[in-house]
Amino acid sequence: MGIKSLSRLNHQTKRSIAAIFVFLGGVSIVAFIYVDRSFEVSPAVNQSVSAESVEEISDAQIETESYAVYSALFNDIQTSDRFRLFPKNTKTYVIGRSTVGCGNESNKVFDDEDFNRSEDLAEGSENYAFKELQLDSEMRDGYRRAARRCRVLSERIDIPTPYVLVDEKEIETLFTDDVFDGWDSFYKKYSDSTGFISLSNVGFAPDLKRAVLYISRECGGKCGTGDFVLLEKDGALWKVHRTVNVWVS
């Protein structure tokens, strides 16, 4: 998708634009909705200190589980047929360091001013995905709350394929003029990659047994795809349960 060419796309592609906005404008997620109900505070303990301790424990668990989800997602991409537009032969993944859709100015390399007028369509695409994934209202609301929060990823994604985390400003420098020339520059710099991958934060069910996130792959001026993914925890392992594609180009 080109920075300047989006407004000239046909109606079918504009449906994809609406879905792209989902990941650019409102999707990234870390759901701070889990509370360890087995943790009980004695009345004799200072309440302010105890509340901070509960929050720290919950955040630490979410942090650990989030990277376990990311790892399971990439392993599924490499071993299953669910992600047909994510090549299995990728030698190096190029991943955005900041999660997408968290309401700030990051991850707008492929953005266009028209996206700011597509909120209703974007919400419709998101609702479609949530319906297909059969998310209950509690998980939907938690996901959307978490979408406003940003995460800076670290090298904790555990996959056999090498990957690099790239700041958006670095990508922006490759796309300063023409989007197609930008992709030429991108592949010259990251010759072993098959495009630029963006991830959202991970939204969890309150019991940390289900998780939902968004992943996209941009691979050229008219090349890309985006999916919502539902994972479920089987014992100690996360497994992809279902995917919903919301745009393709």
Image (spheres, rainbow, N blue to C red):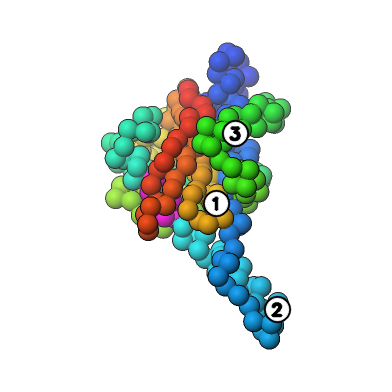
Q: Along the line of sight, which residue is nearer the eye, 210 or 7? A: 210
Please give the name of the residue rendered at 50% of the width and 60% of the height, measured from the top-left corner. 63
Left or right, 234 with respect to 4, comes to: left
Q: Along the line of sight, which residue is nearer the eye, 7 or 17? A: 17
User: Percent from the top left, x then y, of residue 129?
Assistant: 55, 33
Q: Specify the segment rendered in magenta.
A: 66-74
- Going from N to C along the chain, the mark reached first, 2 or 3, is 2
Element under label 2?
Answer: helix
76 is within the stretch colored magenta: no
Q: CA distance from mark 2 to mark 3?
A: 39 Å
In this view, the mark in front (1 or 3):
1
- Going from N to C along the chain, the mark reached first, 1 or 3, is 3
Please give the name of the residue rendered at 31% of the width and 37% of the height, measured from the top-left corner. 80
Left or right, 160 with respect to 86, comes to: left
- Going from N to C along the chain, the mark reached first, 2 or 1, is 2
Q: Amino acid at mark 2?
A: Gln
User: Percent from the top left, x then y, of residue 76?
Assistant: 34, 42
Residues under numbered marks 1 and 3 in contact, where contact means CB atoms less than 8 Å apart? no
Q: Which residue is mark 2?
A: 47
Q: Which residue is mark 1?
A: 205
Q: Amino acid at mark 1?
A: Ala
Looking at the rendering, which quadrant does residue 34 occupy? bottom right
Magenta region's main secondary structure?
Answer: helix
Please give the name of the residue rendered at 68% of the width and 86% of the height, measured from the top-left corner. 44
Left or right, 106 with respect to 174, comes to: right
> Mark 2 Cα within 10 Å, few/some/many (few <14, many 20+)?
few
Residues under numbered marks 2 and 1 in contact, where contact means CB atoms less than 8 Å apart? no
Q: Amino acid at mark 3?
A: Glu
Q: Which residue is mark 3?
A: 126
